[in-house]
Amino acid sequence: MRNHLLCSAIALTAALSVPAYARPMTETDLATLNRVAAPTASADGRWVAYQMTETAPDSFKRSTGLWLIDRHAKDGAPVRIADTPGKNESDPAFGPDGQLYFLSAASGSSQLWRVDPKGGDAVQVTDTKADIGGFKISPDGKRLLAWGDIPRECTDFGCDAKDKGEAPGPGTGRLYKDGAGFVRHWDSWETPGTYSRPFVFNLEGGKATAARPIDATLVGDTPSKPFGGGEELAWGPDSRTIYFTLRKADRDEPTSTNLDIYSVLVDARMPPANLTEGNKATDTLPAPSPDGKWLAYAAMARPTYEADRQVLMLRNLDTGETKKLTDAWDRSVGSIAWAPDGKSLYVTAQDVLDHPVFRVDARTGKVERLKATAEQWEGNIGSVTPLPGGALLYSRNSIAVPTDLWLRDAKGKVTRLTDVNRAQLAEIDPVKVERLRFAGANGDTVWGQIVKPANATGKLPVTFLVHGGPQSSFGNGWSTRWNPRLFSAPGYAAVTIDFHGSSGYGQAFTDSINKDWGGKPLEDLKLGLAAAGAQDAQLDTANACALGGSYGGYMMNWIAGNWNDGFKCLVNHAGVFDLRAMAFETEELWFDEWDHGGPWWTRRDAEKWNPVNHVTNWKTPMLVIHGEKDFRIPYSQSLAAFTALQRQGIEGELLVFPDENHWILKGQNSVQWYQTVFGWLNKHLKK
């Protein structure tokens, strides 16, 4: 079953036609490679549409447009559709009439448009006062579900709200009163009274009319913020029932992971019913069965724990009886899609280093990992869409190649639908990826990866990459931010380790980092670097720099004080420097309090894993990076780390982005980030 995980080395290339020697990948390549997302298919499976973001290499200006594939055409080549120069088109979705609906700013604001895939001009469907953030067309095509940021007092989709959340008086100050809950979240300050709210429209004659809210007296965001999307809302097959996910916005919201799933009959004028009221942890991803008899969804068991295992649940919509369909399966469900016949469901989940697709029997809960060849199926699978006849449309990327679209038929045969970066990747040196397995802390099996230029000779300096989360994985997937392939491009070997606390290895392994941030993970990293050097003699592990962001940045601060002879340099992006300050400054308190044992004043050994207590042991040069709009780990943490370096005479640099949050997202900023990091690495690593 796991033979594909046991091979010691897998040679991967960016494209079949990659030459033996090309050129190293650059930070500009990463910023300008095309980015495919949001694939969707018509009901009969003939048409496939997707959005693609392109980046100009001179200005790094980005534009998003729609592309269409006719699977009945002889060549099936993607063609651009509904393009308005200078505007963005995104979020494609087919209606039951075969029309392609999408969002566009062509009218000056984000509105819903439609176009016939067979030809013709795009037509505007909505004209709302507020921007539309997302939408879903009812199965019968007669209604539209749309959501956007709307003040609570608005009964239409946007209005001139009297209460704009501004404090009284002549100044610019924001006033947040007792019990306000979030005052800021991720990268923006909250506007009191404004939430992401769902509305239903009638669709008549190609136009949306008669908008009315469906959240009644519920106060909160649906989809949830900051990362929730259309996967948190769904139409029932009767075109009358809507299911949506919402966490109540009150004084407890910063400490609550209690997302609930509500159902509402759009014509009944009844308030939404809470279907998961009995569970105080997360319930999300509502997915009604094709016959409307069952509601599948994902649920966690432990309140306030955002990284708990998500179990696939099945609720009988007639009786209300609910069963845990995958309770015996020690993996966390990340997405849900019903097979057209309603007999099984397709789910994705992190599994060791991959993120594959599994089929779950709707009656027995039996889980089967779908199989195909490694090049076509392993890696990071997403956007799974079942098609008529048992086929699956999906996106795939890996640590070596960015996202493209694929099709798997009922017999398991896989066909590539897109190859959007073929020409650019053909210019770039191929890489070799090795999987690493070793005994980590407590003797537990720990996995990692080694990425290096395929044609490299001689000893290679090591860039040792530590992932954030910490409950996540530096797995076999493409990243537009922390990209191991790019980190290997200057002639380095990039090494990643999925230390204790990582996802995809069972819930106990994920839980094991709790109240142990600097313990087992640090031991795994030490053992992992040694294991990588033992497995691949080309790695010069004595000539290494360590880099990490978020929790990985915390680990850079921790390494600086507790493994200060291991690396030539460190790169700390948005890392926690002082756990005490973090406990009072971060916004999603549930994360910090779960991982460390409650509010600061209730924690046992609160200072045990606090990097600030070990600054006098620091001696390794460190580059510190942060975004000013980062409210998850405020940039004051990096200012403190830089001050510690400067006051002790330790070599350091500080790079601050005033227009970025916890992540560096803008093209020109990404290029600057990598140029600065590579300059730092090249200064300290001997080639």
Image (cartoon, rainbow, N blue to C red):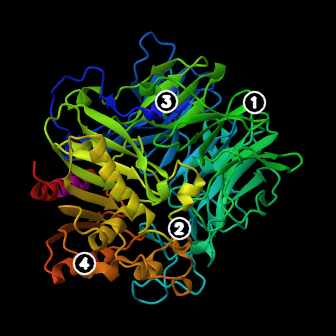
Compared across the picture, whether 134 is left or right of 435 comes to right
Compared across the picture, whether 598 is left or right of 341 comes to left
**Number of the label disc, if any, that sits on residue 617:** 4
Q: Please name the residue that numbered disc 3 is placed on.
A: 3
Q: Secondary structure at mark 4?
A: helix
Q: Please name the residue that numbered disc 1 is placed on.
A: 343
- Can the viewer see residue 148 in this picture? no
> How far is mark 4 from mark 1, CA to CA?
60 Å
Residue 552 place in picture, x, y as percent: 36, 62
Residue occupying the point 50% across, 47% down? 111
Residue occupying the point 70% across, 38% down? 142
**In the rendered structure, are the residues bearing label 4 and label 3 in contact, judged by CB atoms less than 8 Å apart?**
no
Nearer mark to the viewer, of 3 and 2: 3
Q: Earlier in the sequence, mark 2 or mark 4?
A: 2
Magenta stretch containing residue 599, yes or no?
no
Q: Earlier in the sequence, mark 3 or mark 2?
A: 3
Q: Please name the residue that numbered disc 2 is placed on.
A: 514
Which region is colored magenta? 668-677
Amino acid under disc 4: Asn
Task: Check disc 4: other Cα within 10 Å, few if <14, some if 14-19, many if 20+.
Answer: few
Amino acid under disc 2: Asn
> How far is mark 1 from mark 3, CA to CA?
29 Å
